């Protein structure tokens, strides 16, 4: 059993495959400029669905980053995850092949539903052609743990591996698992989430969510914190981060992009959004406590932004409850309104945006949102220059999970 360490968990690598950019720099450029890429869904078999708008990853070629033998075994959500993992490892200077110490590298991902597209294809073969036509990888490709398994097998990583099978807040929980593993002595962790919920079968499953927006106009379908809030639109894609001990990163001579300073999670109940006020506020306080951070230390909040009036009200109130008067002054943003909510991947993409915002000294805007009707300093229309040292990332799930994560800029210590 490894012993508890005191080193800080540092983010040294970022890999992004998102609707608004398939590399970190492209993602940040779009986020900073407040671009919205929401559009009518173009996936085959989806044209008749009530859900009409989403964030699609266009022109994604998994074969450019992933070997064929892995592609045939895996669903689109794992393709996103493996591609993002490869980009993150390259960013951290660890992409040169198998690790020298394979038991020192682990993987933890989060997933909300797994490989719906792969599963649908094989079930269609079963009912249309017979059981002999069902491929052997059906048993693993749909599984929500597939991305963790395939990333670890492909990279030869034999350290602690796991999966958070949860709703949206699981994305932040995966980063917390990675941070704790590093503090216990694991050398390096790959952590994050990727989702691919836009296949017809997956979309039918989502239609049971009353929070889902069925508005057909892309610029009106997802407007949280406004009087015209009508739900959220989904997205595909995700992000993986390399998390390692800060001291080891310094010894390796790689930049520490940020540190994961504090995390907490709570559970209220599914779809009872008024109850999420207390749960989210408790998660925020817990994350601040773990980070040794006062409310006034938070320089920017990346909001969950459900887009449901009751949920938006509860989130605004939770920010005020946890941060006091500072909650009305601190800049709040929700870049996901330009790309959609990628379920478990949504808060991981927000964490990436938080790291990049701190690096560049700019709070990105909240696309498509103008008439804010809550007591928040929501950044809209254009990026706001600011000195950013500490960010708070929030997430809630449709099934009742709440999570908060405190992220500090690289080189910053607790104040």
Image: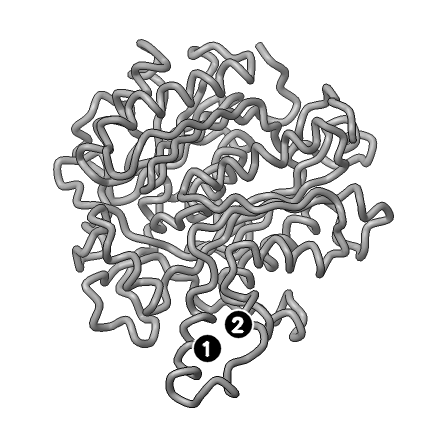
The structure residue drawn at horizontal position 62% and vertical position 19%, both measured from the top left corner, is 412
91 or 126, which is in the foreground?
126
The residue tagged 1 is 122
Position of residue 193 measured from the top left corner of the image (x, y, whole percent): 52, 48
Query: Could you tell whether 175 is left or right of 372 in the image?
Result: right
Position of residue 365 measured from the top left corner of the image (x, y, whole percent): 35, 37
Would you place residue 46 above or below residue 265 in this image?
Answer: below
Screen quadrant of the N terminus: top right
Would you place residue 298 above or below residue 23 in this image?
Answer: above
Q: How is the image coloured?
A: one colour
Mark sitting on residue 167: none
Position of residue 195 measured from the top left corner of the image (x, y, whole percent): 45, 55
The structure residue drawn at horizontal position 30% and vertical position 43%, both measured from the top left corner, is 367
33 or 148, which is in the foreground?
148
Task: Specify the farthest residue to the front.
Answer: 131
The residue tagged 2 is 138
Q: Secondary structure at mark 1?
A: helix
Label 1 packing within 10 angstroms: few (<14), some (14-19), many (20+): some
Query: Could you tell whether 328 is left or right of 374 in the image?
Result: right
Position of residue 49 measured from the top left corner of the image (x, y, whole percent): 22, 67
Screen quadrant of the C terminus: top right
The structure residue drawn at horizontal position 24% and vertical position 32%, both measured from the top left corner, is 273
C-alpha gap between disc 2 and disc 1: 7 Å
Query: Could you tell whether 205 is left or right of 30 in the image?
Result: left
Query: Could you tell whether 290 is left or right of 393 in the image?
Result: right
Query: To which quarter of the image does residue 225 belong?
Result: top left
47 or 163, which is in the foreground?
163
Task: Specify the farthest residue to the bottom.
Answer: 129
Q: Are marks 2 and 1 in contact (CB under 8 Å)?
A: yes
Of marks 2 and 1, which one's residue comes earlier in the chain? 1
The structure residue drawn at horizontal position 35% and vertical position 20%, both measured from the top left corner, is 281
């Amino acid at each position: 059993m490894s012993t508890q360490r005191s080193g800080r968990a540092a983010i040294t690598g970022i890999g992004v495959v998102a609707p608004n950019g398939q590399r970190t720099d492209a993602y940040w450029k779009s986020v900073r400029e407040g671009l919205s890429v929401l559009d009518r869904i173009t996936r085959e078999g989806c044209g008749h669905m009530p859900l009409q708008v989403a964030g699609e990853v266009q022109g994604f070629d998994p074969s450019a980053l992933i070997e064929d033998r892995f592609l045939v075994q895996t669903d689109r959500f794992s393709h996103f995850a493996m591609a993002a993992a490869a980009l993150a490892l390259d960013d951290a200077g660890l992409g040169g092949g198998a690790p020298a110490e394979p038991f020192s590298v682990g993987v933890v991902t989060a997933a909300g539903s797994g490989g719906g597209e792969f599963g649908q294809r094989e079930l269609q073969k079963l009912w249309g052609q017979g059981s002999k036509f069902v491929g052997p990888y059906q048993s693993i490709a749909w599984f929500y743990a597939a991305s963790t398994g395939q990333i670890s097998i492909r990279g030869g990583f034999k350290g602690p591996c796991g999966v958070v099978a949860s709703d949206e807040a699981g994305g932040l929980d995966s980063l917390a698992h990675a941070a704790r593993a590093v503090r216990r002595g694991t050398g390096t962790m790959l952590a994050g989430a990727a989702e691919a919920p836009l296949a017809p079968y997956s979309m039918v499953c989502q239609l049971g969510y009353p929070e889902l927006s069925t508005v057909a106009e892309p610029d009106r379908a997802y407007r949280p914190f406004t009087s015209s809030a009508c739900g959220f639109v989904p997205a595909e894609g995700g992000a993986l981060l390399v998390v390692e001990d800060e001291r080891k990163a310094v010894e390796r001579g790689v930049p520490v992009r940020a540190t994961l300073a504090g995390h907490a999670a709570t559970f209220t109940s599914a779809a009872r959004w008024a109850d999420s006020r207390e749960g989210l506020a408790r998660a925020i306080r817990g994350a601040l406590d773990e980070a040794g951070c006062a409310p006034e230390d938070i320089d920017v909040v990346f909001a969950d932004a459900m887009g449901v009036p009751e949920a938006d009200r509860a989130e605004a109130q939770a920010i005020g409850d946890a941060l006091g008067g500072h909650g009305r002054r601190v800049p709040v943003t929700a870049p996901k309104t330009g790309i959609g909510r990628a379920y478990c991947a949504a808060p991981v993409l927000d964490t990436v945006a938080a790291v990049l915002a701190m690096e560049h000294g700019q709070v990105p805007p909240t696309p498509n949102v103008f008439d804010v009707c809550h007591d928040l300093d929501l950044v809209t229309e254009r990026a706001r220059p600011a000195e950013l040292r500490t960010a708070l990332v929030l997430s809630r799930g449709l099934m009742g999970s709440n999570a908060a994560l405190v992220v500090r800029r690289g080189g910053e210590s607790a104040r």
